[in-house]
Image (spheres, helix red, strand yellow):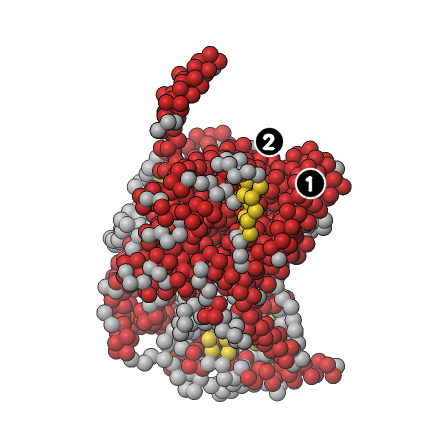
Amino acid sequence: MSVAVRRVSESELNQEIAALAANPAARFADLFGAHEQGRVLVRVIYALDQEHRYLMLEAPVTDQGHPAISDAEPAAYVEECELFEQFGVRPSGNRPLNRVLMPPQSENTFPLLDGGRRAAVPRELRAPLHVRGEAFEFPFGPVRVAGWESLYMGLVTTGEEVLDLYLFHWHKHRGIERRLRGLTPERGLFFVERTEGLSAASTAWAYCRAVEAAAGTDVPASATATRAVAAELERIYNHAQAIALLCQTTGLSVGQAQAEIALERCLRLNLAAFGHRYLFGVVCLGGARRAPDSAAITSLLPAAVTELERAAAALLRTNSHVDRLETCGIVDERTAHRLAVVGPVARASSVPIDCRRDHPFAPYDRTVVSVPVGTAGDVLARMEVFVAEIRESKRLILELFTEAEAEVATLTGRDGAGFGWAESPRGETLAFVAVDAEGRIERARLRPASVRNWRAFDDAARARNVFTDVPIIEASFWQTVAGFAR
Amino acid sequence: MTEQQQVEAELHERAVALFRRSLHIRTFDSGSCAVCESEIRLLSSPYYDLHRLGFFFTPAPRHADLLLVSGVAVRAADHALRKTFDAMPEPRIVVAVGACALGSVFTEDELVHGSVDAVLPVDVYVPGCPPSPLALLHGLLVAVGRLEEKVQAFRFDLRERNPA
Amino acid sequence: MITAAATALLLAASLWLAAAAAGGLAERALGLRFATVLSTLGGASALVGGLLVAVHGAAAARTLGSGDLVGAVTLRVDPLAAVFVALLGLIALAIGLYAPRYHTPGGGTAWYTTVYNLGLLASLGVLVAGNATFFLVAWESMTVCSYLVVLRNHRRRGVARAAFLFLALGETGFALIVAAFAILAAHTGTLDLGLIAHRSSVVPAGWRDTVFVLALLGFGFKAGLVPFHIWLPEAHPAAPADGSAFLSGLVIALGVYGIALFGFQLLPQGPAWWGLLTLGLGALSAVVGVLYALMANDLKRFLAYSSIENIGIIVTALGAALVFGAYHHRELEAFLLIAGLYQLVNHGVYKTLLFLETGVVEHTTGTREMNALGGLVHRLPATAVISLIGTLGIAALPPLNGFVSEWLIFQGLFQGFRISNHLTGIVIVVAGASLALTGGLAITAFARGFGIPFLGMPRSRRAAEASERGQPIVGPGLLAAACVALGIGAPIVLTVLDRVARATTGTDIKARLLVPNLTVIPAHTGFSGFSPTYLAAYLACIAIVPVLIYLAGRPRARTRTVPVWDGGILAFTPRMQYTATTYANPTRVTFDAFYRPEFHVERASDDPAGRSGPVHYRFRVMPIFDRFLYAPVIRAVRWLADLIRPIQSGDVNLYLLYIFVVVIVVYLIYPF
Amino acid sequence: MIWFLRGLRRGVVTTRYPAHADPWAEALPTPPSFDPQKLTFELAERLAAACPAGALRRDGPDLVLDLAGCTGCGRCCEVGGEAVAASGSFELATHDRGSLLKRIPIGADRD
């Protein structure tokens, strides 16, 4: 558990960021705000993967605007916009901002995190999202394919090639971080699980680790094993889902059916092992509420994974499928670094980051996690990473489930701030929780992997792709809008 | 109920009876956590195969008879939800799916309505977090009148036999 | 009848002359109105005169002055020229009705009115010229007047250059035409066109070939055949709307007249390769014209390229007629001549219409750029309806005029297999196939040319605020009526054109062309046939069916009007519509090798900080003819000019010396 | 690769619901059922406090269960001992929002 917190002044923040941005070993992880004695405190988190630690910079900022972090660190742009929408502070130098969580209907004022309202913003300070010249914007969504999340894609196109892409996630912004304020951490967990339901276990894990870190509580080893089993089961079913969606988008119905059979078997395995198809309610503060059903795991897991692997292997031998995936939606290594993407998206682009290995925590510190890496950065590379990770997750589950128990440690000291992380199916998920003296949440920050990875989606979608490639790329990213818009 | 309303209600009932054989579903995600969407997608998987019951998903609300709404009814999505509903031909059925859509997870605030009722007239409620595909199938069959509701008779008394 | 016709034509000429003189009054509104009324009446007389001659089907000639080699002026109108005269009249009539509302009275307009009416007069002169000298004088006057017409807005950027380009290419063509006439005159010993036609058989074969090629190229410059077409897309946007209409409806048609004059009258019975050469140039022009039309975003440029395409189709038909004539398929020769002339008349009508309506669009919105227009059907309803009729006509959709004539041309070209020489037959059928490609692309091009400006949402503020009040409607409306009449009344048109063809080629195919009562038109006995008249009636009948279904279904269903389904977005914006560029994107991708486009994309999200913002996308088609054909020629001419510049010293004595030397040389050569 | 044969070879997996019940569904999380006789007011308060979704509340003499809010997490079963157990019923769809509110009399069997 190594997080170094460093407090800097507003002017020092700029230099620190510039140094970190120039350092190839430092990876931008998060940027968010908090209230502190009537001021706004900006926190910037960097992951120093090779040194196995996180670095958190804290800088109080004035109302005049904080240093424009995205100047040095482009990946921070979305968080900078979010900071403005939550706290009303904006980068200095009148850098234009996009709307990321608040809809344009809310015009110039919108509710801030503390319930106050932001004064009107001059129009020119908004980054305009529109098309000039001879291309046009093909509106797609928010109501899209049946069973897909609401998301608006403005495909800027010449009629065929995708030149650029505007994503609007605000249709789903539920204000979970607002809602968590003033709740007890236990009650908060209920909303945290529903932030990004498809990674409920890992998001809850990161959140619980943050609360536990704040309280200084140690979690029993058997409970961490249970959490890990749940998180790995989650990874398997999510990757199965991504493979099924890849088949749906390439139009391979039988492949889709086979992957869905495997997916359903994984979900039933979850149900049999933990009593919930999507693993809600497994992770709780201080430990794990349910122990995995060993019989279910030994009998159902190998069969389900074998079924999935067989389907995936057949898909990778099918030319009509592979041809659609190859060289489609490329995220090159430079972009992956520049936008600080995480998870399978990063790993398929030769960025071998995985916080189970780079920032080891129980129970992963007891075992060696192998991290599959692809080099092409295209959809095919991502699918291959999925398949390899399914295999690795199965191995981890079989290694860990025997020691998994439902044990819960009582949380002792209640106030304080803590930072937690976990590897969700979509990549590193982070949580920061500050609890006040009354044991209520003062500020909870959730940063699911989707927040980082959607950022690279438009880059991937516009690199030599046409319209019909966009759903394929979306399936291969397999991010959720819920996670971004939380 | 005025005579006019009565006539309309009868017409609606007769029309809904037509849906027994075949019906097209448009889904709408109004702020779900993506799990309800996942269960809805699985309805068309081989395990549940809702096509065998005469249900089909359609991307166009113009062809849809039933609107399946999941999620908490985020205010920012009102416009889209209303538009989708308006685009559907009458008669139409609205099914709210999942605890969020029923208004029990998130209370009303500046960003969310709390429940889909606040935006659309909901015909059928399907509880569950998430409602499993079987619960969804049950909800759809109740919506078109092919299955009886069970929950009204069920009193959640341990001493009674489970009606199932 | 001929006397009546001659009187009508004389009246037309006088009225135009008067209109030119009255042009000076156009500094005021009343004067402008007076001049245009004269011009309109002149148009009506010319229309009547031309029709009378065409219907009569025989030439009328009159010589003025003495029979000297140069001094005599012979006026003659044969039925072939009469078709062009009638077209000239109709166009002048429509423009005359249009002009007073289009132009604002003032000094520039006064000059313009004078020049334009002189241009009409000169055009009439070309058509009624009975001898080479008068023809050339009229031709040159017509060129100069057209040049001045293009120069109307000379202060605008690019106008002077465009006008100069027109003049330069026109004069180059003129030099070739002069050469052609000079060779003919030298070998036949006369300048009288009738006599030249009689005596042309005495011209040696090699010289005949030279004359034909010179004439084809020379008139090709004026007709806008590829690769001599580059003045059209420059001059049309520069000229005022009615000037463009005059250029496109008439001036380039005169180029076709020149080709027909040489091919059918002055040098009859040429070898087959003349026809094949003509055919090839025509087919090339048609395909290249329509391909560039699809990429043009300026409405007038677009129409200019479409003119190149149409002239290509007409010239293809004439070329095929020459080929069939050379192989002694007299009936097919006459048939294709009829079809080509039909297409020519149609093109004159709908292209004039479209140019005039483009003028309305430009006046009301301030732009011709398609990507700045949109939604005009709600704001300019009459203009939209008239433009739609013209568009349907030019896109060759039944039952309008363009369909009839293009269908006839296809029918004729597919008779290529009747030619004994298989290679020639194949060439003709290939030309037919390329015209089919042209037709398909033309439909796309005009769906775009009408749809982008008139349908959808306005793409600019000016387009949203456009109003039709005070805009000319009658002139274009008359042409729209002509489009319908020329389509539905095809049997009558064909009867008249048959007389023209009989007078020109000596073959009468009326009996085969029109089956009595049924008005069905077979291209060749037993091949195929149809009736535009019945088709129109039939279309009108089936158009009622959906209305009936709607009315029958209405009482039972309650109607609820909701917006178009848009995926639940907040609001459609004009930037969510296909632009003119993207509409043509599939064609651009297919013919990438021909277009060689250059792209330019700017993204704010490429900014190092990764902020999202507007995307700017531009794209340009490489002008391959300008770059690979004209640029080297211009370089060569410049080099040559530099070389001979020392001769032009500016010293008067030196110039006197030059004249002296020339006189000596002439006297030395003359005795031989 | 013939996906057609591959699909056929996999066989039929489709559930026979609603004609026949699906055995695996028994494990699904479901709302709780209560034994009114074993419920006390104190237990009812504890149950209401334990419910993370706020689907349980005491209303006078009754314990009110809002099926719409119940996520089937099972915390009430942990707290309630013998008085509470999963109902096993997932077929809860209804036209009437009101019928999702269930009143369970506390303590006595008043029916």
The chain holding disc 1 is C
Q: Residue at point 35% right, 35% down?
A: A23
Which image quarter is the C terminus of chain C in? top left
Which image quarter is the N terminus of chain C in? bottom right
Q: CA separation, marks 1 and 2?
A: 28 Å
Q: Residue at point 51% right, 78% down?
A: B23
Report the residue marked by disc 1: C18
Tally of numbered tags: 2
Q: Residue at point 38% right, 40% down?
A: C187
Report the residue marked by disc 2: C155
Do discs 1 and 2 share a chain? yes
Side (left or right) of A80 relative to C563: left
The chain holding disc 2 is C
Residue occupying the far right of the picture: C30
| Amino acid type, residue under disc 2 in the picture | Arg
From the viewer's side, name the closer residue of A101 and C58: C58
Side (left or right) of B148 relative to D17: right
Name the element at disc 1.
helix
From the viewer's side, name the closer residue of C663 and C627: C663
Q: Is residue C374 above or below residue A399?
A: above
